[in-house]
């Protein structure tokens, strides 16, 4: 591959709902550009993008894949992203380093929930965007209906630049509104086409769509608008420049019709990307900050500048090691370069650098500003790290990965595997930061967190395949809390003789409930020295230890005020341990007298579903002790807001997928603690008693 300047590079991410055809489009682009000899098939695992065994087995994309090729003396860096929301972290990282986002919609299903979600990601990133209505060869394809949906959901910036002559199996001819020609594809899979005049029966619509496009372009600039009013149209040069600028500013979202599978429409889409999509120079400077500072640093995409690179993805490659995928924002990265990881402050030596095409690597001599590449065997560099020269210390903003939606507790199947499991889990996290691990200090469980059941299942299968360890996954222990509703006044005398010095302590305490969230309070109200001041801290310590262990079902106690107001001691037998025991026994007795209750964590749940599934989803939420808080409409979708106990959300992703045929998505976050219903509390107490008996 020859070397390209920054202005001759196109970086674009393919985004869309699962099954919208992004992976086959990638193969079609590679085929049309001569990079591969055939277009692969997802069904037989022969695509360039989906090369991991788990992707081949499941027939879905799991990892974002970088595929580089050459077309029209330009370099294309294609980022094929997964469509399943379980792997949305891959979409975030790909959009972070792209200059254009291409949204894929299916010609039958149209705008789906996943389409909405990734569109929002691109909008937040302020990326120039295009829409490809794919699978036009489907016998039930309805191009105009999908266009109408797209305009309703994504706004008036959606601009039709093509429409099909026929749909379904006869999809081979496209009216190009820009060129005002009919593109006739051979239909033999080669992707070649010839231009013909537009047939009379399509001339009226073509002219109307062309006029609408010209007006949209004219509206993007005052000069163009003036020319449009003076001339009644725009010249070809004015139209091209206006379209380029409008696309870059997200004022126009061009819409195409294609069939990746039959390779119809793909070549023209590639030509449009080459001619109109922004290059790294036109996207402008990136903004970083000085390390450990808020002082901004502007990074112009100048290949002659100081080298600055950002790692957006980490891969573990067998027999090679860690492969860091990066984008260069300034300067040029070359083998032998010493560069500083601004997170750790450590120097990294750049060894071999590569261009990527799926799993295939090609060694190159440089990666310049605006380009994407890969480097092997960096010592301590991971996703989200910025590498820059000593003379230009700068940190680029990290990728904001989505919050986890699901958790699971791990139980090793083999003894002595803990270290290998820990190493494997942390390696998987480095590769996919949306997969997280934490050790719950309260329950002493290793908790994994991710975007859905499939996400966690994939990670645990990779753990077994690559690190040779197996684990079971179970529901994490819910962090219930205990508290009280009434006050209680109790005393306890601890007296024990063991032959020598005995143990003696007597305490009188008053226990009061506190407002939710105010925690524990200890009040020393001893007067007259009935308990020596040196024993009071032991009472407090004993109470705090019992608070952690709980009284009712073994969960931490919260929001309690304890007042120590009387007691007695023995001149010889009293000591700190005696007062500690007396305080704990009095406390346990007092809690049981103070109308103890249990609290459970409540989460706010936001579920986005198509209209037809709304009733079923609401019914499911209600049947799992959820309380519907309201609904909002978003076009053909309903956003259901509810408050649901955390204990009812385990495997919710699977339930939702089943109810909505995979078309529902959700987000959740912690809200507050709430009293557990009496029957649930009794069940928890019984479970705690049974576990205690088992451990005994």
Image (cartoon, grey):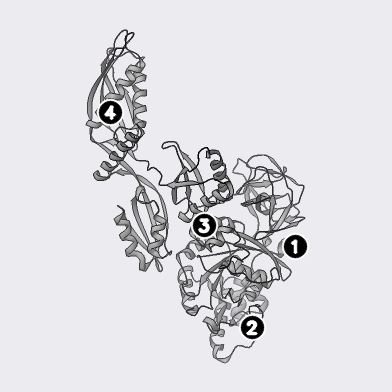
Q: Residue 161 carries which label?
A: none
Say which residue label 2 marks.
186
Say which residue label 1 marks.
4
Percent of width and height locating residue 574: 32, 12
Sequence-first tag of 4 and 1: 1
Q: Single out the mark in the foreground, 2 or 3.
A: 2
In the image, 410 versus 247, the foreground residue is: 410
Relative to residue 520, is residue 384 depicted above or below? below
Q: If the image is split into quadrants, where does the N terminus sit? A: bottom right
Percent of width and height locating residue 303: 74, 55
86 with respect to 245 (left or right)? left
What's the CA distance linking mark 4 and mark 3? Answer: 48 Å
Give the magenta-colored segment's residue range. Answer: 568-572
Mark 4 Cα-neighbour bin, 10 Å: few <14, some 14–19, many ≥20: some
Mark 2 vs 3: CB contact within 8 A? no
What's the CA distance linking mark 3 and mark 1? Answer: 31 Å
178 with respect to 540 (left or right)? right
Say which residue label 4 marks.
588
Q: Which mark is residue 88?
A: 3
């Amino acid at each position: 591959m020859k070397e390209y300047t920054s202005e001759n590079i196109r970086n674009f991410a393919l985004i869309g709902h699962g099954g919208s055809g992004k992976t086959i489009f990638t193969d079609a682009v590679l085929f049309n550009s001569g990079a591969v000899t055939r277009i692969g098939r997802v069904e037989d695992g022969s695509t360039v993008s989906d090369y991991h065994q788990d992707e081949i087995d499941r027939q879905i994309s799991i990892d974002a894949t970088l595929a580089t090729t050459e077309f029209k003396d330009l370099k294309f860096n294609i980022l094929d992203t997964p469509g399943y929301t379980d792997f949305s972290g891959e979409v975030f990282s790909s959009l972070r380093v792209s200059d254009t986002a291409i949204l894929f919609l299916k010609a039958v299903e149209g705008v789906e929930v996943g389409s909405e979600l990734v569109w929002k990601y691109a909008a937040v990133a302020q990326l120039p965007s295009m829409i490809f209505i794919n699978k036009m060869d489907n016998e039930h394809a309805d191009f105009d209906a999908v266009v109408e949906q797209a305009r309703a959901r994504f706004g008036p910036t959606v601009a039709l630049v093509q429409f099909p002559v026929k749909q379904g199996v006869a999809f081979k001819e496209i009216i190009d509104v820009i060129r005002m020609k009919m593109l006739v594809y051979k239909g033999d899979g080669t992707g070649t086409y010839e231009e013909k005049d537009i047939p009379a029966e399509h001339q009226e619509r073509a002219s109307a769509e062309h006029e609408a496009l010209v007006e949209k372009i004219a509206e993007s600039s005052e000069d163009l608008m003036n020319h449009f009013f003076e001339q009644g149209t725009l010249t070809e040069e004015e139209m091209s420049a206006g379209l380029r600028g409008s696309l870059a500013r997200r004022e126009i979202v061009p819409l195409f019709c294609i069939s990746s599978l039959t390779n119809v429409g793909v070549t023209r889409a590639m030509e449009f990307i080459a001619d109109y999509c922004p290059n790294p120079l036109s996207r402008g400077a990136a903004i970083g900050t000085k390390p450990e500072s808020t002082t901004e640093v502007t990074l112009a995409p100048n290949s002659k500048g100081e080298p600055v690179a950002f790692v957006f993805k980490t891969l573990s490659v067998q027999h090679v090691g860690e492969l860091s995928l990066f984008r260069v924002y300034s300067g040029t990265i070359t083998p032998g370069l010493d560069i500083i990881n601004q997170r750790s402050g450590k120097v990294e030596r750049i060894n071999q650098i590569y261009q990527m095409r799926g799993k295939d690597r090609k060694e190159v001599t440089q990666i310049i500003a605006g380009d994407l590449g890969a480097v092997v065997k960096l010592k301590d560099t991971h996703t989200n790290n910025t590498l820059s020269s000593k003379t230009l210390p700068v940190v680029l903003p990290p990728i904001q990965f989505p919050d986890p939606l699901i958790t699971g507790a791990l139980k090793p199947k083999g003894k002595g595997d803990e270290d290998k499991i820990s190493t494997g889990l942390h390696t998987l996290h480095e590769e996919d930061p949306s997969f997280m691990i934490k050790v719950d200090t309260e329950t002493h469980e290793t908790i994994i967190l991710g975007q859905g059941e499939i996400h966690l299942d994939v990670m645990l299968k990779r753990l077994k395949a690559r690190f040779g360890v197996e684990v079971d996954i179970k529901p994490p222990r819910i962090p219930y809390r205990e508290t009280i509703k009434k006050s209680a006044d109790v005393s306890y005398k601890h007296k024990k003789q063991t032959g020598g010095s005995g143990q003696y302590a007597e305490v009188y305490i008053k226990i009061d409930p506190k407002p939710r969230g105010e925690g524990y309070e200890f009040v020393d109200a001893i007067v007259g020295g009935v308990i020596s001041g040196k024993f009071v801290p032991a009472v407090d310590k004993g109470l705090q230890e019992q608070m952690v262990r709980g009284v009712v079902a073994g969960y931490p106690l919260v929001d309690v005020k304890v007042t120590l107001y009387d007691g007695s001691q023995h001149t010889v037998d009293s000591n700190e341990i005696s007062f500690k025991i007396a305080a704990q026994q009095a406390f346990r007795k007092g809690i049981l007298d103070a109308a103890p209750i249990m609290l459970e964590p409540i989460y706010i749940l936001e579920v986005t579903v198509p209209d037809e599934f709304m009733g079923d989803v609401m019914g499911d939420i209600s049947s799992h002790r959820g309380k519907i808080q309201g609904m909002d409409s978003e076009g053909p979708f309903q956003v259901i807001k509810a408050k649901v106990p955390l204990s009812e959300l385990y495997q919710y992703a699977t339930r939702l997928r089943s109810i909505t045929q995979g078309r529902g998505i959700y987000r959740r976050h912690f809200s507050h603690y709430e009293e557990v219903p009496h029957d649930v509390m009794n069940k928890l107490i019984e479970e705690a008693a049974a576990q205690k008996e088992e451990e005994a």
